[in-house]
Amino acid sequence: MTPLYGLANLTASDHYLRLSFTGGGLLAGHPVHPTQWIRIWFPSGGDNLVQRGYTLVDPDPDRDAFDIEFALHAGPASQWARDAVAGDVIDATVMGSKFAVPQPVPPEFVIFGDTASLPAINSLLDAIGETPTRVWLEWQHESDRELPVRTGPKTEVTWVDRAGDGQSLRQAAESLTCSPDAFGWAACDAATTRSIAKSLKSTLPKDNIAARAYWR
């Protein structure tokens, strides 16, 4: 495991927090790519540790630096983030994230996520630039809809209410119409992600779908 060193606390909203880190050489030998993530090990009572996956935000290997964004809720990771001050140290592990934007770039992307996967979505939007993209994002708190989404000139973002345990996201996927060679990407809670992936498979080739449960 590699120790991360905290540099700054950048509050994005009352339910969302961005922290800056130096990586302790974490990025050496691990080329930066969209949606790249690591496991961070958080204290959880006594000598116990729990691991949670987080996307690297604006990774800069030359400076050995990156940010992490925390969607705050009850739990050891959120509590650590709330209490963190500059100079704090925490261990992290690279776990083999390998996603790459398909080549040639598909004519359209359809993306489904929430505030937990927003950092990954933003890194993907940065990578695909002016490719036509539709994004459905699930919000829980009113302030969520003020979080920055890195839209391009051909990006359409729809925020949907989390009420109904992902029902709005699932309905969006079920009623989706898109190019048969579009690329579908989904990262939400486990049940919603499975449902969206099933809907996408009825519309798109298997190789044009990336889906990962980000939380339970």
Image: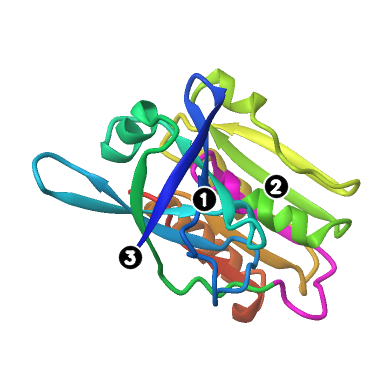
> What label sits on residue 95 in the rendered view?
none
What's under tag 1, amino acid-wise?
Answer: Thr
Circle 3/circle 2 CB separation < 8 Å: no
Q: Secondary structure at mark 2?
A: strand
Q: Earlier in the sequence, mark 1 or mark 2?
A: 1
Closest to the observer: 106 or 26?
26
Q: Residue at x 81, y 73 (%)?
A: 105
Side of 134 where 59 appears, left or right: left
CA separation, marks 1 and 2? Answer: 31 Å
Vertical placement of residue 152 versus 141, above or below: below
> What label sits on residue 22 in the rendered view?
1
User: Is residue 22 in the magenta section?
Assistant: no
Binning the other alpha carbons within 10 Å of mark 1 as few (below 14), some (14 to 19) or many (20 upward) gives many
Residue stretch in magenta: 101-120
Q: Is residue 98 visible?
A: yes
Q: Position of residue 190 (x, y in %)?
A: 38, 54
Q: Secondary structure at mark 1?
A: strand
Circle 1/circle 2 CB separation < 8 Å: no
The answer to which quarter of the image holds residue 60 is bottom right
The residue that disc 3 covers is 1
Camera-near label (3 vs 2) is 3
